[in-house]
Amino acid sequence: MKTNQDFNDWNEIKKLTDSDEIVRNFKEREIFYLKMGKNIGFEQNGKGKNFVRPVIILKKFNRNMFFGVPLSTQEKEGNFYFSFEFTKNEKIYRNIALLSQMKLYSSNRLLNKIGMISKSDFIEIKQKLKSLID
């Protein structure tokens, strides 16, 4: 359940995130933890005290902006989801890309790289996104 305190806490983190001047290096296909925030309605939220969620970098526009898709570990099926696996430190992680939640993000939100989606899955996820828009 969301409270006004959740929004107040996120607002403080958002102010610090906005003023962050660290340049982050990132590439398409990479998976990063990102400060997602506390959002409204059915928009995806981050978790924990810093409102963090993993995201796939779909399209890098410049060093400051990219299209990304947030991830979940909860199994979901249908046109708005894409299931895939990636390996980190010899451990396999299964994730669900929440395609309907794709959006433009500032690179200031990025925290740390946690993995990379395979080339074949990356091609497939982009094709599935294109079909959702048509």
Image (spheres, grey):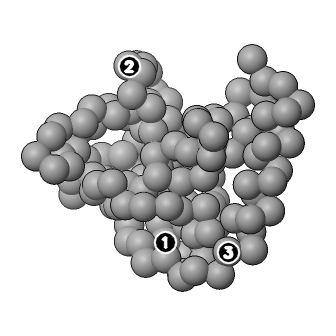
Asked if residue 92 can be seen in this view, the reply is yes
Q: Is residue 47 shown left or right of residue 14?
A: left
| Callouts 3 and 2 close, C-beta under 8 Å | no
Asked if residue 134 can be seen in this view, the reply is no
Q: Is residue 81 shown left or right of residue 17?
A: left
In terms of secondary structure, where does tag 1 sit? strand
Pick whichever, 16 or 115, lies toward us.
16
- Residue tagged by mark 1? 60
Question: Depth-wise, is mark 3 or mark 1 nearer the camera?
Answer: 3
Say if 129 sits above or below 72 in the image.
below
Badge 2: residue crowd in 10 Å (few <14, some 14–19, many ≥20)? few
Say if 84 sits above or below 130 in the image.
above
In terms of secondary structure, where does tag 3 sit? loop
In terms of secondary structure, where does tag 2 sit? loop
- Residue tagged by mark 3? 20
- Residue in the image at 58% along x and 36% along y: 48
The first of marks 1 and 2 along the sequence is: 1
Give the number of callouts. 3
- Residue in the image at 75% along x and 38% along y: 39
